[in-house]
Amino acid sequence: MLDQTAEIAETMLMGLRLTDAGMMRADFRARFGVDMLDVHRATLEKYAQYGLLTVDDARVRLTSQGRLLSNMIFRELV
């Protein structure tokens, strides 16, 4: 069984990698009791500034360029 930190990391990786819609922040908050920005704010904001992620009130998702460089992002999320 995964601990919560590992489960958060796996959920973010799979959600960002497998869907064009990205991760819905409300769904993440409902599942883990915390906003994903509270867990990974620095990483998410850094890659959003590079144009590899979009972060808004509803979701976090990879851009088309972010999909090409996703392993670099994922390394910092685990």
Image (tube, rainbow, N blue to C red):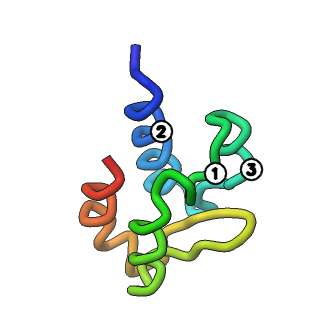
Determine whether label 3 and label 2 are within 8 Å by CB.
no
Up the image or down, 45 lies above or below 22; here it is below
In x, y percent, where is residue 26? 74, 50
Seen at 57% across and 53% down, the residue is 36
Residue 8 sits above or below residue 25 on the image = above
Front: mark 2 or 1: 1
Chain-order first, disc 1 or disc 3: 3
- Say what secondary structure mark 2 lies in: helix
For label 2, the residue is 8
Give the image location of residue 67, x and y in percent: 38, 69
Of labels 3 and 2, earlier in sequence is 2
The label number, if any, that marks residue 35 in the structure image: 1
Q: Compare residues 63 and 24 and report the one nearer the observer.
A: 24
Q: Which residue is mark 3?
A: 26
**Residue 23 image-quadrant placement:** bottom right
Specify the amino acid type for callout 1. Answer: Asp
Which amino acid does the dot numbered 3 rest on? Answer: Ala
Distance from Cα at disc 1 to Cα at disc 3: 8 Å
Amino acid residing under circle 2: Ile
